[in-house]
Image (tube, helix red, strand yellow):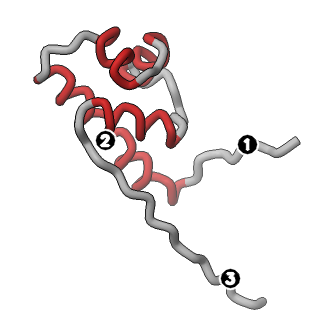
Amino acid sequence: MMKKLKPKKDNASFDTWMWGLLSDAFELAAEYGWTIPRLAAEARLCNSTVYKLLYKQTREPRARTLFKLARAVGMTMNIIQTHYIQKAS
């Protein structure tokens, strides 16, 4: 079984970006006059998933969930692959 990675201090910028993206998605949904159930339906997510994200009860949302919410409100996201070079010891 694979061990779940714990958030590290260097993930702070990712966390800031992620919660900012969610905040923007919720703001756009509000501008559209959408309720949480409507946003969930548009994103094809469960109501409970969207509520948990709204109230920050989900610590580490899946990338797929972020993409679904972004797409539902008309946002676009791109995946950028980076390659890490490990230094020889």
Q: Residue 20 carries which label?
A: none
| Residue type indicated by callout 2 | Leu
Q: In which quarter of the image is residue 19?
A: top left
Tags 2 and 3 in contact by the CB under 8 Å rule? no
Of mark 3 and mark 1, the one earlier in the sequence is 1
Percent across and percent down for residue 41 are 37, 15
**Eye-nearest disc, 1 or 2:** 2
Q: Which mark is residue 86?
A: 3
Q: Can you tell which mark lies on residue 4?
A: 1
**Mark 1 residue type:** Lys
Q: Position of residue 38 (x, y in %)?
A: 29, 12
Per the image, label 3 sits on a secondary structure element best described as loop
- Give the CA distance from mark 1 to mark 2: 23 Å
- Above or below residue 7? Residue 45 is above
Depth check: 84 or 71 in front? 71
Q: Are marks 1 and 2 in contact (CB under 8 Å)?
A: no
Q: Label 2 belongs to which residue?
A: 21
- Looking at the image, the residue that sits furthest to the right is 1
Circle 3/circle 1 CB separation < 8 Å: no
